[in-house]
């Protein structure tokens, strides 16, 4: 559900994702996520960023990443990931199957760009801690430009904060055009360790 209010010249949509279920004859509702969407009359400033760093050391390949991750083909967005000077870089696959029906359905945002940030952060988390985390919280997301203006390959550049308690990230193409900026991403860590054999290639690239 969403409730709309105004704040100056902007429109705010205060959203809640609510799940319901019936237990022993009674209905139970639970709020899973809340968010405030800020709608402006003008697009966000289309700042450029520096181009993503190239891989200069060990990296982990798609085939090893998706031995650990559970995503289906449409959301297997990474083809490789590596570390560089305190950040983790995840390069997006060039060819992905459709993720919506109909395939030409227009969307305001591109969810796979956020997923690129989540999975790149997850490679670092699994490689360094041995645990997988699911998305739990984001302080802020900015959608800068449409993904149909790409110059070269898309990359997520993720910086762990406070020892990996949170992450900041952005998605950029090879000339530094910004597409998404994400701040304060946090995960809920799963209780079980990732299988050591499946984790090994991620650990080698993140050490």
Image (tube, rainbow, N blue to C red):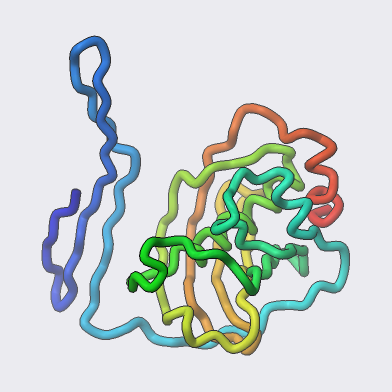
Horizontally, residue 136 falls left or right of residue 32, namely right
Horizontally, residue 131 falls left or right of residue 201, namely left
What is the quadrant of residue 142 in the picture? bottom left
Horizontally, residue 128 falls left or right of residue 197, namely left
Horizontally, residue 103 falls left or right of residue 41, namely right
Q: Which residue is pictured at 57% across the width and 61% down the height?
A: 117
What is the quadrant of residue 70 in the picture? top right
Residue 102: % across, % down:
36, 65
Q: Which residue is pictured at 66% across the width and 49% down the height?
A: 163
**Which one is nearer the viewer's eye here, 116 or 84?**
116
Residue 140: % across, % down:
40, 62
Residue 137: % across, % down:
44, 48
Which residue appears farthest toward the front when viewing the image?
Answer: 102
Q: Which residue is pictured at 19% across the width and 48% down the height?
A: 1
What is the quadrant of residue 192 in the picture? top right
**Which one is nearer the viewer's eye here, 207 or 32?**
32
């Amino acid at each position: 559900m969403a409730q709309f209010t105004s704040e100056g010249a902007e429109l705010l949509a205060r959203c809640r994702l609510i799940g319901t279920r019936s237990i022993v004859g009674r209905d139970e509702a639970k709020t899973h996520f809340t968010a405030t969407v800020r709608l402006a009359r003008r697009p966000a400033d289309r700042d450029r960023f520096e181009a993503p760093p190239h891989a200069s050391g060990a990296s982990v390949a798609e085939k090893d990443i998706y031995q650990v991750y559970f995503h289906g083909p449409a959301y297997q967005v990474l083809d490789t990931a590596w570390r560089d000077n305190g950040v983790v870089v995840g390069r997006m696959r060039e060819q992905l199957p459709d993720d919506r029906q109909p395939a030409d359905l227009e969307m305001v945002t591109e969810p796979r760009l956020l997923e690129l940030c989540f999975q790149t952060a997850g490679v670092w988390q699994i490689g360094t801690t041995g645990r997988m985390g699911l998305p739990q919280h984001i302080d802020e997301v900015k959608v800068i430009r449409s993904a149909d203006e790409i110059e070269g390959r898309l990359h997520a550049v993720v910086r762990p904060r406070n020892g990996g308690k949170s992450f900041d990230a952005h998605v950029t193409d090879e000339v530094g055009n910004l597409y998404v900026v994400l701040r304060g991403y946090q995960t809920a860590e799963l209780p079980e360790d990732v299988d050591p054999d499946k984790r090994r290639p991620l650990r080698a690239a993140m050490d």
